[in-house]
Amino acid sequence: MANTRAISFHFSAPEAKSVSIVGDFNSWSVDARQLKRRKDGVWWAVLRLSPGVYQYKFVVDGARWEEDPGNPNQVTNEHGTHNSVCEVT
């Protein structure tokens, strides 16, 4: 894919049965991108994103929406919680 970058996302949730990443890059769809679980309980995915600024969250077991604890860049959303922010250059 021309003009995209591979961006790696990680989320530690050893107890989880599933983790997905949702954001404005996939219309906040819980089903759009499931992460893969490593043996140490860290879930990961690599997304190819065009340059821009993206908001995202992780969804654990289809119900619990979490910010990225490894990313201090956040904005307040319309629900009064926070979304993580990723800038792709």
Image (cartoon, grey):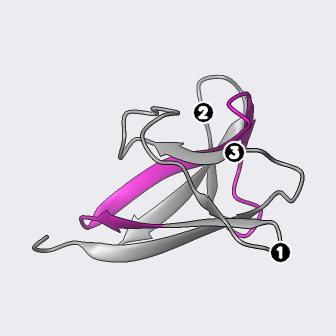
Instruction: Tell me: 42 left or right of 86.
Output: right
| Residue found 53% across the figure and 33% down from its top | 30
Residue 38 horizontal/vertical position (percent): 71, 72
Residue 68 screen position, x and y as percent: 69, 58
Mark 1 belongs to which amino acid? Asp
Residue 85: quarter of image:
bottom right
Mark 3: few/some/many CA within 10 Å (<14, 14-19, 20+): some
What's the magenta region? 46-70
Picture residue at 30% right of the left edge, 61% below the top? 52
Q: Callout 1: few (<14), some (14-19), or many (20+) C-alpha neighbours within 10 Å?
A: few
Q: Is residue 60 rendered magenta in the image?
A: yes
Q: Main secondary structure of the magenta part?
A: strand
Q: Secondary structure at mark 3?
A: loop
Magenta span contains residue 49: yes
Depth check: 19 or 86 in front?
Answer: 19
> What's the distance in space between the residues labelled 3 and 2, CA to CA?
24 Å
Residue 79 location in percent, x, y? 66, 23
- Decide: marks 3, 1 in contact (CB < 8 A)? no
The earlier-in-sequence mark between 2 and 1 is 1
For badge 2, the amino acid type reads Asn
Q: Quadrant of the C terminus?
A: bottom left
For mark 3, what is the residue? Answer: 18
Would residue 89 be seen by someone viewing this image from the given angle? no
Q: Which residue is mark 1?
A: 40
The furthest residue to the left: 2
